[in-house]
Amino acid sequence: MNGRAYFNYQGEQLFVESVALTDIAKQFGTPCYVYSRAALTAAYREFDSAFGERDHLICYAVKANSNLAILNVLAQLGSGFDIVSGGELARVLKAGGDARKIVFSGVGKTAAEMCGALDAGILCFNVESRAELLRLNEVATAMGKIAPVSLRVNPDVDAKTHPYISTGLKENKFGIPFEEAQALIGEIKSLAHLRVTGLDCHIGSQLTELSPFAEAREKMLVLTDQFKAAGFAIEHLDLGGGLGIRYQDETPPTASDYVAALCKDLGGRSERVLIEPGRALVGNCGVLLTKVEYLKPTPSKNFAVVDAAMNDLLRPALYDAYHAMLPTEKNLGEEKNYAVVGPVCETGDFLGHDRMLALSAGSLIAIMSAGAYGMSMSSNYNSRPRAAEVMVDGETAHLIRERESFEHLIAGEKLLP
């Protein structure tokens, strides 16, 4: 899953596959997200092959990066999709995804979103509360349909990750508490327009240890057997996503070790295994390419002011997240310690602190591991148009999202009469 291997120096120039990043900047401008199709394909196949002969479905977590081209590449590889909104459903279908491979997660599904997903014929709804069960039953009854349901259970497992991306503790908003899921068994039987087909859990993101996954798996197997004993035909067990990637010095498990840990003790069980990787598929398949506008030395530190900002890549400001930075050209002179910052009017607008880089005005920097939660979390703060997106396939760079214009920014706004 080392997608960064597809970004490497050839001589003095940093390439993605067979295209120099300096050439991409000349053609498409900066800031610009750049992805490797080969890296994305290799990451998916590594997960897929790890299951061997076991019946499984990989449901890519669309929230990580929802560009249509990325979704289309994954759909062509046979991927399913984990969605959390009606908009993501529309994107997957537009990109050629199979509705029968879609699971719909999220704590706040609206009735309209439920209708759209039922019409599309998705695999199942990952239901996250009793209230949602009741609403889904009402919607399905009104439509004359049976809604396929997988209960998303909160197993109260410490994912040992950043608190903002932990989802499996009892104080988190996600999932039905484990004990409540057990108590719902009888009530669910009275909801005639629901059909329980699976059980689901997801404990967090950017996990770098296997023990939390194993603990959650054990709890889910206990609950699965209780539901089966009560007469439910549990067809699949969805063990979520959350496998981390290397941003700095992390040593996350391989896809093979991760899948082995999930499938341990499943033995001859008949349930299909679903997983929902997002970051682990796309995170290291992309970079954010940015240009140095100014070098600003001060008595306290050296600033490199670049044309990308927190509106383009929010993770550093939001999570204090680390992204490695590589100059697109080697041997540009003496390295200095820089704070790499953007032009947005916030002190929190930084992309990295204490970076040893050799830079000059006009230098290009590749901000690594930006394929996940980069473009999908970007905004127009400070009335900044969002970046272009490019996917490289071998020797060819394809524009997969045009850079926004000022006209895009104000298209939906109206003056008072």
Image (spheres, rainbow, N blue to C red):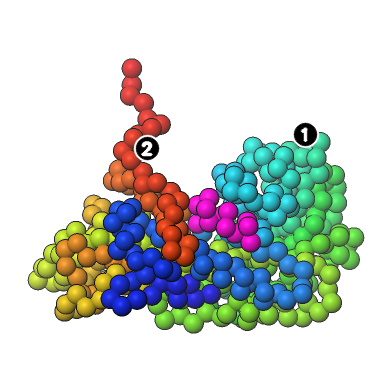
* Residue 35 seen anywhere in this rendered image of the structure: no
* Viewer-nearest residue: 181 or 204: 204
Residue 223 found in image quarter: bottom right
Q: Residues within 10 Å of mark 2 (few under 14, many from 20)?
A: few
> Label 1 amino acid?
Ala
Q: What element carries label 1?
A: helix
How far across and down, in percent of the image, does residue 169 sit? 59, 67
Q: Mark 1 points at which residue?
A: 142
Which secondary structure is most common in the magenta stretch? helix
Q: Does the magenta stretch include residue 319?
A: no
Q: In this view, does 1 lie above or below 345?
A: below
Q: Is mark 2 on a helix, strand or loop?
A: helix
Q: Residue sitting at 21 percent across and 78 percent down?
A: 331
How far across and down, in percent of the image, does residue 244 sit? 52, 73
Q: Is residue 72 above or below residue 301?
A: above
Q: Residue sitting at 86 percent across and 65 percent down?
A: 228
Q: Mark 2 points at which residue?
A: 408
* Residue 199 seen anywhere in this rendered image of the structure: yes
